[in-house]
Image: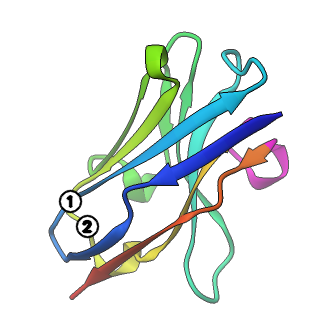
């Protein structure tokens, strides 16, 4: 079983940046898709970005393209989400995930980290 622990959330002003980190451990997950989802109050959980551990291919939601960047440090079993030019609508709980780019395919979720963007 995969364990995922996020860190790096917080409060930032609009236009600012944050870097989220996810420490992955547990069973072998090197063939899996690592990713980030988010859930804002009153809204459904949505996909943000994904990275294929084997090969490093990345994929982004439209709202994340050009502003967010997902990366990984294979040696440290870490996945990161660099978020730039943050907007108030980016306010949400961000979850590190393993296994897919849609909610139904995700095999493991982290506990989530709160990101709040003030206007």
| Left or right of 29 on screen, residue 119 | left
Q: Nearer the viewer, residue 63 or 7?
A: 7
Q: Where is mark 1, residue-wise? A: 17
| Disc 1 residue crowd, few under 14, some 14–19, many 20+, Cα 10 Å | some
3D distance between C-alphas at marks 2 and 1: 6 Å
Element type at marker 1? loop
Quarter of the image with the N terminus is: top right
The majority secondary structure of the magenta stretch comes to loop
* 20 in magenta: no
Q: Can you say which quadrant of the picture contains the C terminus? A: bottom left
**Looking at the image, which is closer to me, 2 or 31?**
2
Q: Residue reaching furthest top?
A: 55
* Relative horizontal placement of residue 36, taking residue 70 as reference (left or right): right
Tell me whether the residue at label 2 lies in contact with that at label 1, contact meaning CB atoms closer than 8 angstroms.
yes
**The quadrant where residue 91 appears:** bottom left
Residue 97 sits in which quadrant? top right
Residue 100 seen in the figure: no
Label 2: how many Cα within 10 Å (few below 14, some 14–19, many 20+): many
Give the residue pinned by disc 2. 86
Q: Is residue 104 magenta?
A: yes
Residue placed at 48% from the left, 16% from the top?
A: 74
Q: How is the image coloured?
A: rainbow
Seen from the viewer's position, the closer of residues 106 and 102 is 106
In this rendering, is residue 37 above or below 58?
Answer: below
Q: Where does residue 14 sit, x and y in percent of width and height?
A: 19, 76
Quadrant of the rendered image containing residue 31: top right
Q: Which residues are magenta?
A: 98-107
Q: Which residue lies at the image location 27% right of the left edge and 46% below the top edge?
A: 66
């Amino acid at each position: 079983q995969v364990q995922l622990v996020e860190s790096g959330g917080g409060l930032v002003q609009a236009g600012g940046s944050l870097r989220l980190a996810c420490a992955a451990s547990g069973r072998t997950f090197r063939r899996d898709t690592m990713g980030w989802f988010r859930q804002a109050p009153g809204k459904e959980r949505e996909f943000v970005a994904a990275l294929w551990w084997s090969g490093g291919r990345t994929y982004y939601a439209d709202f994340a393209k050009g502003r967010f960047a997902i990366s990984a440090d294979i040696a440290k079993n870490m996945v990161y989400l660099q978020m730039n030019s943050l907007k108030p609508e980016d306010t949400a709980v961000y979850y590190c995930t393993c296994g897919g780019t849609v909610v139904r395919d995700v095999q493991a979720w982290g506990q989530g980290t709160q990101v709040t963007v003030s206007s």
